[in-house]
C-alpha cells in the first residue's frame, strides 16, 4: 500500500515537527520559544507561530461534531453519515470516537470490479473509529486542522446477476478503516462552527477485487456545536469572547 505509507509518513513528520516545537517552547535557547517578555499564561504552536491562549482558556473541553461526508463507492457519489464525540485539550488537540455508516447502502447498476455480469448491487460500509485532530491555525473567525482516523467496521452487500431475480449476498467482511483529512472551519457565532474539507479513506482488509470500491476520496461537511460554552455562558458571560 504505497499510498498508505506516504500518507502515514507525512502525518508522522507533522507530529514530530509539532512535538519538537512544543518541546522547544520549554528550552531557553530554542528558536521556537516565545519571547520571555511576553509572559504568556500559556501558548500553543500553530503554523503562523506561537499563539497565546486567552484568559478564559480551559485545558479540557467537550467536543461534539456532526460529521457528514460525501464519498465515492464504486464510482457513485453517496452520503456517509457520522458523528464524533470527544475532548479538546489545550485548544489544538482533539481526540475521541467517531461513528459512520451509509444508512441503507448505495445502489449501483453494475459492478465491473467484481463481475461484468452483475446488473445491480447494493454496497454498504459501517465503522467506528478513534480519531485525533490537530488544529494547525486559528483566529476569531477561522480554523484549519488535520485529522487521522483508525477504526474497525464491516462491509456488506448483495448483487443480482444478469437474468437472475434473487439477490445473492456478498460475504460479510470485518475490516480496518483508515482516513486522513484536512478541514477548514468558519465560526458562525461563539457556540457553533461549520467546516468543510477533503480526505481519503483506506480499507486495506477488503478483498482485493473490491478494494477499489471502498478506497476512495471523501468530501467533508461538519457542524461543531460547543455545548460546554453554552452551559458555561449561563454564569460566565465572558466565555463567549474566547475562541
Image (spheres, rainbow, N blue to C red):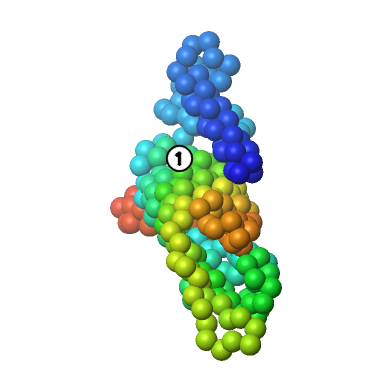
Pick whichever, 13 or 104, lies toward us.
Answer: 104
Q: Where is residue 187 in the image (x, y as percent from the top left)?
A: 55, 54
Residue at x-position 45% and y-position 18%: 26
Residue at x-position 47% and y-position 52%: 176
Mark 1 neighbour density, 10 Å: few (under 14) some (14–19) many (20 or more): some
| Residue 168 to residue 101: above or below | below
Quarter holding the N terminus is: top right
| Residue 118 to residue 236: above or below | below
Pick whichever, 227 or 151, lies toward us.
Answer: 151
Pick whichever, 155 or 103, lies toward us.
Answer: 155
Residue at x-position 45% and y-position 62%: 173
- For mark 1, what is the residue? 93
Q: Position of residue 221 (x, y in %)?
A: 57, 61
Residue at x-position 61% and y-position 52%: 199
> The residue tagged with tag 1: helix, strand or loop?
strand
Q: Position of residue 126 (x, y in %)?
A: 46, 64
Q: Position of residue 190 (x, y in %)?
A: 48, 54
| Residue 175 to residue 238: above or below | below
Can residue 2 be seen in the rendering of this structure? yes
Can residue 242 be seen in the rendering of this structure? no
| Residue 25 to residue 7: above or below | above
Amino acid at each position: 500500500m504505497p499510498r498508505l505509507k506516504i500518507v502515514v509518513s507525512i502525518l508522522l513528520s507533522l507530529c514530530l515537527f509539532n512535538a519538537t516545537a512544543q518541546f522547544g517552547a520549554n528550552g531557553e535557547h530554542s528558536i521556537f520559544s516565545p519571547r520571555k517578555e511576553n509572559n504568556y499564561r500559556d501558548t500553543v504552536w500553530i503554523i503562523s507561530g506561537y499563539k497565546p491562549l486567552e484568559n478564559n482558556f480551559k485545558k479540557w473541553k467537550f467536543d461534539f461534531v456532526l460529521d457528514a461526508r460525501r464519498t465515492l463507492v464504486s464510482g457513485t457519489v453517496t452520503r456517509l453519515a457520522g458523528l464524533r464525540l470527544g475532548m479538546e485539550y489545550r485548544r489544538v488537540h482533539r481526540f475521541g470516537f467517531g461513528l459512520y455508516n451509509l444508512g441503507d447502502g448505495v445502489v449501483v447498476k453494475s459492478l465491473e470490479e467484481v463481475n461484468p455480469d452483475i446488473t445491480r448491487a447494493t454496497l454498504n460500509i459501517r465503522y467506528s473509529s478513534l480519531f485525533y485532530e490537530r488544529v494547525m491555525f486559528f483566529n476569531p473567525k477561522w480554523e484549519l486542522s488535520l485529522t487521522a482516523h483508525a477504526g474497525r467496521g464491516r462491509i456488506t452487500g448483495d448483487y443480482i446477476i444478469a437474468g437472475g431475480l434473487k439477490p445473492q449476498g456478498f460475504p460479510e467482511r470485518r475490516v480496518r478503516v483508515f482516513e486522513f483529512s484536512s478541514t477548514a472551519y468558519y465560526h458562525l457565532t461563539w457556540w457553533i462552527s461549520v467546516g468543510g474539507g477533503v480526505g481519503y479513506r483506506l480499507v486495506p482488509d477488503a478483498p482485493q477485487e473490491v478494494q477499489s470500491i471502498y478506497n476512495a476520496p471523501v468530501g467533508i461537511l461538519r457542524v461543531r456545536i460547543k455545548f460546554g460554552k453554552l452551559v458555561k455562558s449561563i454564569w460566565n458571560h465572558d466565555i463567549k469572547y474566547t475562541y
